Amino acid sequence: MNNELQTLTRQVLDDPDWYVRRKAARLLRRFPSQEAMEALLKVLVEEIDGDVVQAAILSLAKLGSREMLEFITKPKIMMSPQESVRWACSYALGAVGSVWHFEHLYKFVNDVEWNVRNETITTLERLIKRVRLDEGKGAVGLDHKIHLLVRMLQVDNPSLQECIIEQLVRFDPELAEPLLIGRLETENECIKLGLVKALGRMKCGQAVERLVSLLADESLRVRLSATEALGEIGGAKALNLLVAKLGNQNELILKAAIAGVLNQKDFPFIEAVLIDSLRNDWNTRRMK
């Protein structure tokens, strides 16, 4: 152990001045050694000053220490009253953790402090992309990956939802589509919205029947997403359902249905279908 490292490990653990201990904790990240990491891990157990704990967490993250995960996921540190410590935990989980730490990160999604919430969303997006890089290595089965990503859809954040949907769409559709359709039974609106959007982008013909039932969902957002998804999927059945929605009194759903119908470029008879629908609608109104 060189002299500087020896001095820093002594200071971070024993110096009576919190400022000196914090400075030592920050400087120890320059030493990728077992001695430095052991001293910093000891800080997580013994230190009572939040600023020193935060410095130790960030240094351990820079050193790539996965050993610290056991310590920072305990309530004593993770639920610290000090904002900077919670922020550091979120950052560290993104640096050396995995999507399997979602349950811990979920505690920060609604944190009272904006910067903790923001860092948590950034961390979750980083971990989701890490799943993408790990795809095909067989570390985790497809069903488990999809199960976890679908659970993460419950976080009502547009940026995070888009990141998850992009990942779901990348999976082998033959294997992934049945798993996604089966999870549409959820009562969670955010999860349902994410699944509907993913199935639409995958142009999943198997999902048409289930999407049809969602056109009567009590949530306007779900009904609108289901209409848009049917427009993306296309096909004769989806087309007929979209045409039926042209009489919908909700302007958003009406616009989505029109966009979906106009998107069916593979159907040469689209104009005739629209004309017939409008004629039937006019006749219905005249008879009232």
Image (cartoon, grey):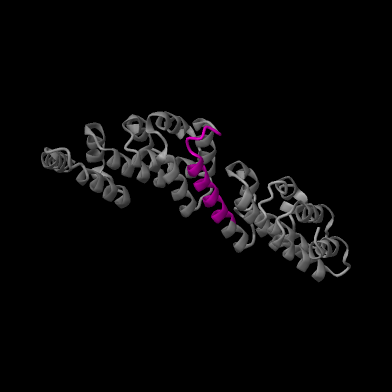
Of 230 and 140, the residue lying toward us = 140
Q: Is residue 113 left or right of residue 215?
A: right
Of 3 and 225, the residue lying toward us = 3
Q: Position of residue 21 (x, y in %)?
A: 81, 66
Q: Position of residue 270 (x, y in %)?
A: 14, 40
Does the magenta-highlighted stretch encompass residue 90? no
Q: Is residue 63 above or below residue 244?
A: below
Q: Is residue 18 above or below residue 37?
A: below
Q: Is residue 46 above or below residue 231?
A: below
Regarding residue 12, the answer to whether it shows in the image is yes
Residue shown at 36%/35% (left/top)? 211
Residue segment shown in magenta: 120-139
Q: Position of residue 259 (x, y in %)?
A: 24, 48
Residue shown at 63%/49% (left/top)? 96
Regarding residue 219, the answer to whether it shows in the image is no
Does the magenta-highlighted stretch encompass residue 123? yes
Of 170 and 108, the residue lying toward us = 170
Of 5 and 276, the residue lying toward us = 5
Helix, strand or loop for the magenta stretch, by majority: helix
- Residue 167, image quadrant: top left
Q: Is residue 204 above or below residue 35?
A: above
The count of marks equals 0
Q: Is residue 34 left or right of residue 282?
A: right
Q: Position of residue 244 (x, y in %)?
A: 24, 38
Residue shown at 23%/37% (left/top)? 239
Q: Residue furthest front?
A: 2
Residue shown at 75%/65% (left/top)? 51
Q: Is residue 180 left or right of residue 86?
A: left
Quadrant location of the C terminus? top left
Quadrant location of the N terminus? bottom right
